[in-house]
Image: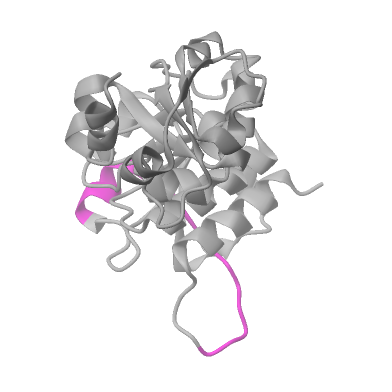
Amino acid sequence: MKLDDIRKLHQKKYRQASDYYLVEGEHLVLELLKAAAGQPYLMRSELYVTAAYEHWKSPLKTHLVGERQMARLADTTTPQGILAVVPMPEASISRPGANGEKAVYLHEIQDPGNLGTILRTLAWFGGFRCLLSPGSVDPFNPKVVRASMGAIFHVPLETDLPLQDLTGRYHSFACLDLNGDRLSSPAFGQHDCYLFGNEARGLPREQLAPLNASAYTINGRGEIESLNLASAVNICAYELNRG
């Protein structure tokens, strides 16, 4: 891939057109190599390194570039000197409950840091698929990829999935509500798909109604009105894996 084309991967439209995205930094590249052992399509990734990483032994095709070239390719202000051009994940659609997998659906999530943190949590616990609605932040945005700390390689992802389309995929839904049942209720773990709304607006009630989602609440004693979205997902994922 030409260097000018790699630089364009900072923009969503070029990532979608080429089916590639950027991974930057030593930690993320190491996670990429680890994931490639079990996901052969990742072996199509290519590394771009400065002289500082020229000694690296990697099974990926590697290109040596200068410091100035790396500065142009990288998204960070002070690049480490190593990045990879990575193919988009191969499409996969799960059946409800297949291999015990549960789905986490995020409706119009906007913050790259929130999405990256959520992916990191889902990867830590395992057994989750992440579904994103239209209008959500691109999961292959460089900020999301960095915040995920490599989880982007380990969590099955689906994008542009409208809320109303979930009824054809899943049988039982759960969402959060201040007036819902306790999260510790045994029923909380019995659902196929867990729904979370936009950071500011939550879930659209008119679209949520046909899903007949069971409501649960995260009990708190403080005075603030709500939890950060990533924190709420983290607590729910922990509860689903507790014990």
- Residue 59 at what x, y percent from top left? 61, 13
Magenta region includes residue 57: no
The answer to whether residue 127 is visible is no
Residue at x-position 36% and y-position 44%: 68
State which quadrant residue 1 falls in.
top left
Q: Residue furthest bottom?
A: 223
143 in relation to 179, above or below: above
Magenta-colored span: 206-223
Q: Residue furthest right?
A: 243
In the image, 98 versus 229, the foreground residue is 229
In the image, 70 versus 139, the foreground residue is 70
- Residue 52 at what x, y percent from top left? 59, 38
Magenta region includes residue 221: yes
In-image side of 208 versus 28 (left or right): left
State which quadrant residue 55 falls in.
top right
41 in relation to 148, above or below: above
Residue at x-position 64% and y-position 14%: 38
81 in relation to 167, above or below: below
In-image side of 87 versus 28 (left or right): left
- Residue 238 at what x, y percent from top left? 68, 52
Q: How many marks?
A: 0
